[in-house]
Amino acid sequence: MLSIIQAAGWPIWPLIACSVVALALIIERFLNLRRARIIPSGLMQEILNSVQRGVPAPQALTAWEQQSALGAVLASGLLALQRHPTCSEADLRTAMETAGRVVAHQLERYLSTLATIASAAPLLGLLGTVVGMIEIFGSQAPAGSANPAQLAQGISVALYNTAFGLMVAIPALMFWRYFRGRVDAYVLTLEASAEQLLQLINALRRAAR
């Protein structure tokens, strides 16, 4: 590997940096986009059962809010209801939508960086190719003869950087699409859960009248 890096020349170093950053982001997103961290099993039913018995205590709301993304969205609506028991359905929906946008932004964290690496890596590889081609043309002596060592170096720079750029870009693009789809699925589930809680609150209000 060291010999390949040496043969590829200086243009490969930005690609190596991109590969390290991309790997770190992929590992970080795998750890933080686990379903247990976003939508814990049984939490939705626990919140619904608690709401049926009345507005949950502030301690419970704080615990749910800090536990997961789902808890943060649903607790925001319950906190609004706790502060203003007579607030309208629109107010509750606005509170949960605001919390949902914050959660969605947190779920999308670093995805734009991963997408940028997927887009930039082929261009960095192309830069290495151009540098290699410059070295190839520079190996041509005025008399028409070529310097074999410089010619080989130029070919190595051109080919290695092109290949390494694709090796970085393809996995980064695949994982970006994978995480993007996972985030979209989580956001859809959060929206459905918030709507379910809102319907329960409305039903309880109608029953209390």
Image (cartoon, rainbow, N blue to C red):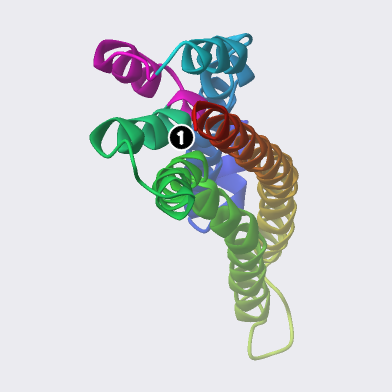
User: Who is closer to the viewer here, 28 or 171?
Assistant: 28
Q: Is residue 69 above or below residue 52?
A: below
* Residue visible at 63% across and 31% down in the picture: 1
Region of the chain picked out in magenta, as a range: 55-71
* Residue visible at 60% across and 55% down in the picture: 115
Q: Residue furthest front?
A: 209
The residue singled out by tag 1 in the image is 73
Q: Is residue 182 above or below residue 91?
A: above
* Residue visible at 66% across and 56% down in the picture: 161
CA neighbours of label 1 inside 10 A, class few (<14), some (14 to 19), many (20+): many
Q: Is residue 95 above or below residue 73?
A: below
Q: Which amino acid does label 1 sit on?
A: Val
Q: Does the magenta stretch include residue 68?
A: yes
User: Who is closer to the viewer here, 88 or 165?
Assistant: 88
Label 1, secondary structure: give it. Answer: helix
Residue 72 x, y percent position in the rendering: 41, 30
